[in-house]
Image (cartoon, rainbow, N blue to C red):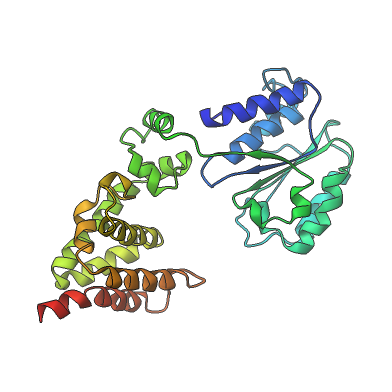
């Protein structure tokens, strides 16, 4: 169990041992905080044949099946990154929950990113949320609970997973394999989500990000570096979209008088300072154009993407070229 989840887990465990369990929960909070890990711990306790005040036994037939990922009384919906969760999927799930438990105990459903339910799917789930059949439990996970219908929210006990404090999070990250070099700006880059930050560091993304920043600096000083920069930006898609956006916003912050420790990319100050040499109006226009480009439904256009990037980069340095004349 991740340390920042422990207080929530302990409270839930107390409710379990005191027989005060709800039958539906909503685990909400930003991406990268381990909501799925918490849900799986809850599932193990609910399905364990010999639970105790400290947790599931880990030895019974049910626990063994869970470890191997083939427990017949656990249904997980939404793990395949579906764009939406439709009514047919939900009705199929309801049918399984209404049936008998194959191991004679509880039945549990986890719905990942529940905010993707269509309105008809959410309405189909309402009765089951209110009056589940037998010993059925439903665990909804959501990164954006504000997108769920009020009727869904009102039928779930809410467990909010919040961002942990920075200092203990950094300490935890530095103790993990691949996270020894963790710094506060790494957390800022990843919305202060520990698991997202750890994946970023383990995946070598920090080296690649710094490489992109250096190539942008070289291009700003020498437009002949345009082709190399575009190649790097395309290679790092979709990450380069957010990295460039952060650099532009940091440059605007610098112009507004913010200190270095208030920048998202505090380790890329040479690039940020170079961008900050443009006028505020020019930077704002470049930021708006970049946001429009990145907001295209399928991300950066796949049709001649290098042409789109070339246009944006040439517009970025227009002010320099004008002053040079």
- The residue shown at (70%, 40%) is 158
Looking at this rendering, what residue extends furthest in the left direction? 325
Q: Horizontal placement of 85 versus 38: left or right?
A: right
Q: How many labels does the image show?
A: 0
Looking at the image, residue 316 lies above or below residue 187: below
Q: Can residue 79 be seen in this view?
A: yes
Q: Residue 112: x percent and y percent? A: 65, 49
Q: Horizontal placement of 207 versus 224: left or right?
A: right
Looking at the image, residue 193 lies above or below residue 236: above
Residue 116's quadrant in the figure?
bottom right
Residue 82's quadrant in the figure?
bottom right
- The residue shown at (30%, 53%) is 209
Q: Residue 305: x percent and y percent? A: 37, 75
Q: Residue 249: x percent and y percent? A: 34, 59
Nearest the viewer among 98 and 222 is 222
Looking at this rendering, what residue extends furthest in the front direction? 257
Nearest the viewer among 66 and 37 is 37
- The residue shown at (32%, 47%) is 262
Q: Assign the C terminus to one quadrant of the image.
A: bottom left
């Amino acid at each position: 169990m991740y340390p920042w989840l422990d207080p929530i887990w302990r409270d839930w465990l107390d409710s379990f041992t005191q027989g005060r369990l709800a039958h539906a929960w909503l685990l909400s909070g930003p991406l990268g905080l381990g909501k799925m890990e918490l849900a799986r711990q809850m599932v193990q306790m609910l399905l364990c044949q010999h639970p105790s005040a400290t947790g599931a036994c880990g030895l019974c037939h049910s626990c063994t099946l869970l470890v191997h990922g083939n427990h017949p009384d656990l249904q997980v919906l939404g793990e395949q990154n579906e764009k939406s969760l439709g009514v047919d999927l939900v009705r199929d799930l309801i049918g399984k929950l209404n049936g008998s438990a194959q191991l004679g105990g509880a039945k549990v459903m986890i719905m990942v990113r529940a905010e993707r339910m269509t309105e008809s799917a959410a309405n189909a789930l309402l009765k089951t949320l209110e009056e589940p059949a037998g010993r059925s439990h439903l665990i909804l996970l959501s990164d954006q609970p504000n997108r769920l219908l009020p009727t869904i929210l009102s039928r779930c006990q809410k467990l909010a997973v919040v961002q942990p404090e920075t200092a203990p999070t950094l300490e935890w990250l530095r103790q993990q394999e691949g996270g020894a070099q963790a710094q506060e700006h790494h957390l800022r880059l990843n919305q202060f989500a520990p698991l997202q930050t750890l994946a970023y560091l383990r995946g070598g993304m920090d080296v690649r990000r710094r490489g992109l920043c250096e190539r942008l600096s070289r291009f700003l000083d020498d437009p002949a570096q345009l082709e190399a920069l575009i190649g790097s930006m395309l290679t790092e898609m979709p990450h380069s979209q957010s990295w460039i956006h952060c650099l532009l916003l940091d440059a605007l912050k610098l112009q507004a008088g913010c200190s270095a420790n208030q920048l998202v990319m505090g380790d890329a100050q040479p690039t940020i300072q170079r961008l900050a040499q443009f006028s505020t109006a020019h930077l704002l226009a470049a930021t708006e154009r970049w946001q429009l480009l990145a907001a295209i439904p399928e991300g950066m256009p796949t049709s001649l993407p290098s042409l789109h990037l070339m246009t944006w980069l040439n517009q970025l340095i227009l002010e320099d070229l004008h002053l040079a004349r």
